[in-house]
Amino acid sequence: MSEDKFDQLRDWLDLELEETLDDLLEAEFSAPMMSKEVRQIYKEHHPQGLEGRIYYPNLIRLQAEMIKLQDWVVAENRKVLIICEGRDSAGKGGVIKRITQRLDPRVARVVALQKPSEREMSQWYFQRYVPHLPAGGEMVLFDRSWYNRAGVERVMGFASDDEVEQFFQDVTEFERMLVRSGIILLKYWFSITDEEQQLRFMMRIHDPMKQWKLSPMDLESRIRWEQYTKAKEEMFERTNIPEAPWYIVEGNDKKRERLNCMEHILSQIPYREIPHEKVTLPERVFDPDYERRTLPDNLYVPKIY
């Protein structure tokens, strides 16, 4: 390789690395409006946080493996369903964001349903979730799922005791049906301590860019911490089946939570690297008689930056 070619390649790699780091920093820049005092409190509560020099290289490595998993899902026409559950502020969204950050959104979809409509409330409980299940060649991540009935609906009184009991009787067979249909089903519970949730709620209160995450339901969940704990324990006891077991991800350290969950997903699916044909860029066709038109200025976005 000539020296000029080598310099061009090095410049290109530098630009690619810079863009990658920009993407990572933007995703990780989670508390831009926190006061100095709140930042200090957070650091004091996380003295053993995972260092960036360990976190970032492993995040990039795992995201590269996720792309290989995605290619395998498409090539083998597989169906993958990942359920993400946990307490409010437990880090579900952050994990999902890192999993899907570099994936094709036409293959990897995130489902986060709103509260059910009146019509949906009159349907079979699982009916509103069925249209979102993966087809062949798809990965679907549920940011909360039908387990709402075993958690928030039960604790907040949105479901009767009979409805909750019916759910427990139905859900295991429903999940066995999904697995028998060829869906690879993984269920994750993201776990944080009482103290960590309180700290994260306080951070949201003092951060204008995160206050939208705090709903009245979130605040009520603080009051009912023990009720949620009891509901979670019964949920594990009654729905942890061999065909679809629960996996608990400790989430007090967000960076470790993300990496550990991604490592585990990759370890549970027997994917392989799919060989790709070498891509060659075709030559552009030029029409010597074509003259490009000049477009009016008002079609352009103003160049503020």
Image (cartoon, rainbow, N blue to C red):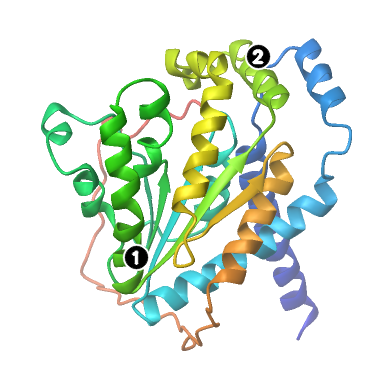
- Give the quarter of the image for residue 265: bottom right
Q: Residues within 10 Å of mark 1 (few under 14, many from 20)?
A: some
Mark 1 or mark 2: whose residue is earlier in sequence: 1
Residue for point 36% across, 31% down: 301
Give above or below for 119 relative to 16.
Answer: above
Does residue 213 show up?
yes
Q: Which mark is residue 95?
A: none
Give above or below for 160 relative to 86.
Answer: above
> Which secondary structure lies at badge 2?
helix
Does residue 305 show up?
no
> Which secondary structure lies at badge 1?
helix
- Give the quarter of the image for residue 156: top left
Q: Are marks 1 and 2 in contact (CB under 8 Å)?
A: no
Q: Which mark is residue 202?
A: 2
Amino acid type of the residue that numbered disc 1 sits on in the rendered structure: Arg
Give above or below for 220 relative to 277.
Answer: above
Q: Is residue 174 left or right of residue 127?
A: right
Q: Is residue 21 left or right of residue 115?
A: right
**What is the C-alpha distance between the residues marked 1 and 2?**
40 Å
Q: Residues within 10 Å of mark 2 (few under 14, many from 20)?
A: some
Q: Which mark is residue 176?
A: 1
Which one is in front in this view, the residue at disc 1 or the one at disc 2?
A: 1
Q: Position of residue 287 (x, y in %)?
A: 25, 73
Residue for point 77% across, 51% down: 55
Q: Is residue 166 left or right of residue 254?
A: left
Q: Position of residue 221 (x, y in %)?
A: 51, 19
Screen quadrant of the N terminus? bottom right
- Front-most of 118 and 106? 118
Q: Position of residue 106 (x, y in %)?
A: 34, 60
Residue for point 20% across, 70% down: 289
Amino acid type of the residue that numbered disc 2 sits on in the rendered structure: Met
- Front-most of 141 and 164? 164
